[in-house]
Amino acid sequence: MFRNLPLIVLLVSGVAQAGERAGFPHGAEPPPEAHEGPRPEDRPCNVSFKAWVRHQQPPASPPPKAEGWDFSAELFQRILAVEEATPSMVNTWCIGRSVQGRPIWATRIARPDAPVQHRMLVFAQLHALEWIGAEVVVALAERLGQHSPKGVEVVLVPLVNPDGRHRAESDLLEEREGVYRRANTNGVDLNRDFAIHRESDNIWSRLPWFRRYYTASPAPLSQPETRSLDKLASTGFDISVSLHAFGGVIYYPWAGVSSPIEDAAAHRDMARRMAAAQPGRAYRTVQLGRYFRWFRGLGMEIDHMYAVHGSQSFLIELTRSGIRPFQPNTWKDYFRWYNPVDPSPHVEDGVSALWAAITHYASQAELQQGTPTHPPTPQLRQ
């Protein structure tokens, strides 16, 4: 009965946000006024991860709605703990800055006693309210810190949109209800800011009511957050996974068109491998551009990582939402839409899916008998 709940929510939120913020697609916030002088995102990252974390303070009294969830300061404290416990295997560096100048951190995890044969990129929180992705990334870092398979380097970016996350946290702490957060500070949906399939030939894209769902950003890689992620991805990864919420689906390309990619079978096999490893009810696996007949995802990272950087590419919609059809108080609770009351089982589902991909590449590395196929990760500091 509720199989199409994600679509229903998308339609309702799109209509509501278009009325509230006309001219800004996807529920994005209006951009700030232009200012002269150097932009905050152009400043170099000249602070160490450890020093930066030491200055982050989690809230003394988190709101009841966020019980069981970590604020960003706590997430990075957990990553620092993994790094300090295994410094030879884990290091975190800044790959760029957000619009407001917040650092965007990436964490590399790889065993020092084996050459890197395969690389995996996992990133989350392009969208401000989708906290579950960051929780999964950090939990995966902790698991890798305890046991990292030989031959596989994993690079994790828990918060691609740190400004949006900061605003979402402030909303909770200041008890601002009914505020929808998706975009970065410039009002751009980062999930529509990539270079591939930015226009659609689908007939639905020409109809006025549907047109809002076929809107990409002003230009490819127009934002500092996506440029930083793209620069990292350009170093070469075998597989790239973007974490979102919600829906309980593992998508593979294409998103912008309904035609299949050349190696659709290999993507489908990997998606099914990840779904089969989940301890809960396994997620669906499907090409994103064929999930709904009328929908196409334009300018999305899943197509960009595949077409531009040659990675196997997946987008995982974590959880099946915190909305409860018979609990009206959840219907307009935007935080709860994307983040269920108890994150634990959903984190386990996400980590288990990613772990299946990691162990698959580790088994390939073992068969390759230690022949390195990737150079060490460059430190892409800005």
Image (cartoon, grey):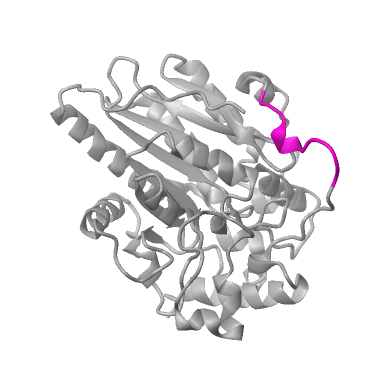
**370 relative position to 120: left or right:** left
Q: Quarter of the image for the N terminus: give it.
A: bottom left
Residue 160 seen:
no
Q: Position of residue 380 (x, y in %)?
A: 53, 27
Asked if residue 311 is positioned above or below residue 250 in the image, the reply reads: above
Asked if residue 233 is positioned above or below residue 172 in the image, the reply reads: above
Q: What span is colored magenta in the figure?
A: 35-45
Residue at left offset 52%, top offset 17%:
84
Residue at left offset 52%, top offset 79%:
205
Q: Quadrant of residue 370?
A: top left
Q: Position of residue 187 (x, y in %)?
A: 71, 57
Number of numbered discs: 0
Q: Position of residue 302 (x, y in %)?
A: 43, 54
Residue at left offset 46%, top offset 24%:
378
Q: Quarter of the image for the C terminus: give it.
A: top right
Residue 154 lies in magenta, yes or no? no
Q: What secondary structure is the magenta-colored segment mainly? A: loop
Q: Position of residue 333 (x, y in %)?
A: 67, 65
**195 relative position to 224: left or right:** left
Q: Nearer the viewer, residue 153 or 176?
A: 153
Residue 36 lies in magenta, yes or no? yes
Q: Nearer the viewer, residue 340 or 365?
A: 365
Asked if residue 210 is positioned above or below residue 35 in the image, the reply reads: below
Q: Nearer the viewer, residue 306 or 12?
A: 306
Asked if residue 231 is positioned above or below residue 112 in the image, the reply reads: below
